Image: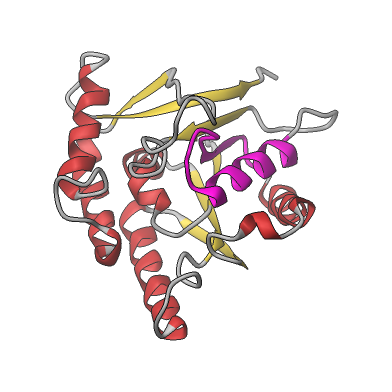
Amino acid sequence: MTNVILFIVAHPDDEAIGMGGCLSLHSERKDKVFGISMTDGISSREGNISEEASERNFMATNSSKVLGFTWLDNKKFPDNQMDTIPMLEVIKSIELVKQKIKPNIIYTHSPSDLNVDHKIVFQSTLTAFRPQNNEIWEEIRTFEVPSATDYGHRSISEVFQPNLYINVESVFNKKIEALKCYKDEIRPYPHSRSLEGIKNLAQLRGNQVGLSYAEAFEIIRKIER
C-alpha cells in the first residue's frame, strides 16, 4: 500500500530536525510525501528579511531534494507570532491542503513544545483532522524538535511521551545531509540543536528500544478503517 504523507511544520527546518530520517524512509518506500510550512521561519528576526527568506527557501528546497518530499506551500503566517492571528485562518489553510491531497498519515509538532508557533500548528492540525464522517486519514503523529520539545516544562504543557520508534540507522546520513542544508539553524555543541546533539538524541531514542538510531513519535490518534 502506498501511503500519502502530510507533515505540517511551523518553520522550514523543523522537518529535517524532527523527522528527517522518517521522511527519507517514506520516500524510499515510494510513499507520496508532502509538506507545508506555516511561516518562513525568518520574519521575526532582524536584518535583511527579504534576502534571508530567499535563502531559507533555497535551504528548504535542498532539504526536500535530499529527503525526497514535495513542499506544497509556505503559508507566510507571522513567524513566532502565530498566536496573534485567528486560529480559524490556520485551520482553514490546513483543511484546503487536506482536501487536495487526502493524506492518510499526518505528522506535526508536539503540544509540549515551548515554541508558540509549534503549539498553534499542533492545535490547528488536530482541529483540521478531527474525526468526522467521510474522512480517510488514519493516523496523526507528533515529533520532537531539539531546543523546542526539550525546553518545555511539564507544569505548563503536556510532556512528549513517545510510543512509536522508527529505526533510521540506514538513512541517518540523509538526515544529517538535510540538516546541513539549514547551516544557519544548526548551533554549536553542546546545544541540543547541534549536529552532535541531534545525533545523540537519535542514539538515545534508538538505545531505548534496542536500536542504534531512531526517531521517536507520539501517536495522537489512530483509526483503523
The residue that appears at 45% across and 70% down in the rendered structure is 42
Question: In the image, is 72 to the left or to the right of 87?
Answer: left
The answer to if 148 sits in the magenta stretch is no
Left or right: 182 as drawn, with respect to 203: right
- Residue visible at 36% across and 35% down in the picture: 150
Identify the magenta region. 103-129
x then y, percent, for residue 160: 45, 26
Q: Residue at x 71, y 54 (%)?
A: 90
| Frontmost residue, 124 versus 158 | 158
- Seen in the picture, residue 156 relative to 148 is either above or below; the reply is above
As for residue 115 lying within the magenta part, the answer is yes
Give the farthest residue toward the right: 133
Dividing the picture into quadrants, the one containing residue 57 is bottom left
Q: Which of the two residues, 130 or 6, is positioned nearer the viewer here?
A: 130
In the image: residue 101, left or right of residue 197:
right
- Colour setup of the view: secondary structure
Q: Report x, y in % for residue 167.
A: 28, 27
Question: On the image, which quarter does residue 133 sit in?
Answer: top right
Q: Quadrant of the C terminus?
A: top right
Q: Is residue 222 visible?
A: yes
153 lies above or below 46: above
Disc count in the image? Answer: 0
Residue 72 pos. (x, y %): 57, 61
Q: Is residue 8 visible?
A: no
Residue 18 location, x and y as percent? Answer: 38, 42
Quick check: 27 above or below 112?
Answer: below
Q: Is residue 102 left or right of residue 214?
A: right
